[in-house]
Image: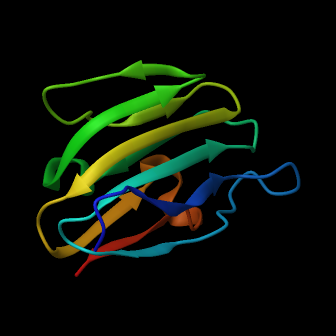
Amino acid sequence: MTRASKDVPELILGSKDDQFTVNQKDFTLIAGQGYRWKISAAGGLEYKFHTDLFRNVWMNQIVINDLEVHMNGAPAWLEYDADGTIQIQFTTVRPGVYTWSVPDLAGRGMQGTITIR
């Protein structure tokens, strides 16, 4: 564990060739570590990214087009009405296995896990 935030591999929802693909489904993080995570939409659909991880981390900020959103609590979900990237910066707090999904498209493979050790 270091004091500096580490990058989580980017999660890309959809692609030009397959609107229902994701580039990675499962992620493993370390409790007490700070992270930056880019979550991008690239498939041209509206994607609603939901995870129970947000309720179990200390959320520092959300960055959209170099604009920062600082909160005193977790977001309910991230919604992409167009292709683009949202970066979240957080510190893991509680070890466990958390899920992420695009709820309306989870049956098409748009879901996975985030494990905090």
Q: Quadrant of the C terminus?
A: bottom left
Residue furthest out toward the bottom: 117
Residue occupying image coordinates x 47% and y 52%? 37
Describe the colour scheme in one phrase.
rainbow
Answer left or right for 35 relative to 56.
Answer: right
Q: How far across and how far down the image is residue 63, in percent?
A: 47, 29
Foreground: 55 or 15? 55
Foreground: 18 or 33? 33
Residue furthest out toward the top: 67
Position of residue 17 relative to residue 42, above or below, is below
Residue 80, quarter of picture:
top right
Q: How far across and how far down the image is residue 99, in percent?
A: 32, 65
Residue 89, quarter of picture:
top left
Foreground: 77 or 69? 69
Number of numbered markers: 0
Foreground: 94 or 42? 94
Answer left or right for 40 relative to 19.
Answer: left
Position of residue 109 relative to residue 11, above or below, is below
Answer left or right for 49 relative to 9.
Answer: left
Q: How far across and how far down the image is residue 30, in percent?
A: 27, 75
Q: Quadrant of the N terminus?
A: bottom left
Residue occupying image coordinates x 44% and y 74%? 27
Residue occupying image coordinates x 88% and y 55%? 17
Residue 23, quarter of picture:
bottom right
Residue occupying image coordinates x 68% and y 57%? 20
Position of residue 89 relative to residue 53, above or below, is above
